[in-house]
Image: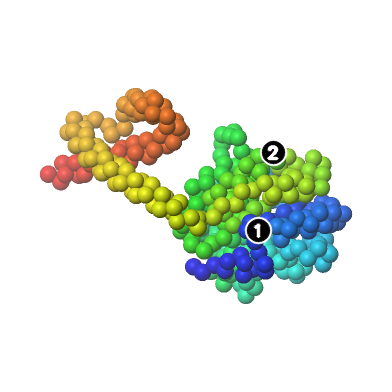
Amino acid sequence: MDFLPLNKWITNLKKPLVIAGPCSAESEEQVLQTAHALKNIEDVRIFRAGVWKPRTRPGTFEGVGTKALVWLSKVKEETGLLTSVEVAKPDHVEKALEFGIDILWIGARTSVNPFAVQEIADALKGTNIPIMVKNPINADLSLWMGAIERIHGAGINKIAAIHRGFSTLDEPRYRNRPFWRIPIELKHKLPGLPVICDPSHITGKRDLIAEVSQKAMDVDMDGLMIETHPNPDAAWSDASQQVTPAMLADIIGGLKLRTEFSPSRTFEHELEGLREQIDRIDRILLENLKSRMDVVEKIGKAKSANNVTPLQLHRMDAMMKNRLEVALALGLPEKYIKEIYEVVHAESVKRQTDIMNSFQNDKDSE
């Protein structure tokens, strides 16, 4: 798929692109006050505001609706900022286009539903208005890619992904777990697709936004969407994750922007040598994994012959305890090693199960 780079959507663009504005458009005064403050921050190029708010439960503020689009028209007229709103239904698309909204985004509660995304894609045919697609609320890369592919199939090539984190049942540090490997994998699978980070929804807390914004820059994301309100504590929705325009300016000003390559030949030579070491170590790791799997297959055959199940929980628990003790003694992070061995063990059980099924099929055919 071909994707038009952000600098083809927006003139004189510098990295990062910053999209800012209130979680919800509450009043004309609030919208315009925020926009006029944001226009003085050079990196802010797009004004965002929630017009139709898909809330988790009824009875909470669900946006003021179409009348807010009039306020956004005034934002563009008075400040020159581009405007953006979330759309969840075809009639939202129709109304946004009618009022000259520049960029639309599809939210996490919509991108999780292929039927809803397809209806929006059908409504977009023939427009080529820029569309940003937030990741689905659950950690499913294929579902995120599918939403992007549906929009692209409607003839849109001005597409960006928005990483806003993923909902989980536990109560972690963040409102939505970032699972950085998923947006990184998205960039690999869809080369050229701009990816923007939404630290407001990842953190749920304004004091963590700067930290997550820097992480987004460190993994080479193209921009940030940060909820901004003149009086965040009085906001009608998501008050705890919004910042003031002054706070936003400090966050942007504090970012350390790194490049993919260095002009220093000495550094590049040193880096190449270190990468060669990594390549050699990885080769040894892969050879050891192959040797391990050979032993796993022998265990599978022995278990088959003695009618023993592939999964033995007491062995798995003892193995994990031992590996973590060794890892901690070596100074390796517990979470890192635990995740690796969970994958390794799952594949080992799968391989033993396949061997047992094959063994049983051979017996049945005798």
- The residue under the point 41% across, 34% down is 337
Instruction: Inspect this view and state whether residue 67 appears.
Output: no
Above or below, 47 against 319 in this view is below
Left or right: residue 160 compared with residue 233: left
Numbered badge on residue 104: none
- The residue under the point 54% across, 67% down is 3
Which residue occupies the foreground of this view, 213 or 168? 213
Q: Quadrant of residue 241?
A: top right
- The residue under the point 84% across, 64% down is 78
Q: Position of residue 152 (x, y in %)?
A: 55, 67
Above or below, 16 against 102 in this view is above
Looking at this view, name the residue that lies furthest to the front.
266
Tell me the residue that label 1 is attached to. Answer: 17
Which residue occupies the foreground of this view, 214 or 92? 214
Above or below, 271 against 310 in this view is below
Which residue occupies the foreground of this view, 22 or 282? 282
Mark with earlier residue (2, 1): 1
Name the element at disc 2.
helix
- The residue under the point 59% across, 64% down is 159
The C terminus - image quarter: top left
Numbered badge on residue 207: 2
Q: Please, what is the three-letter code of the amino acid marked with disc 1?
A: Leu
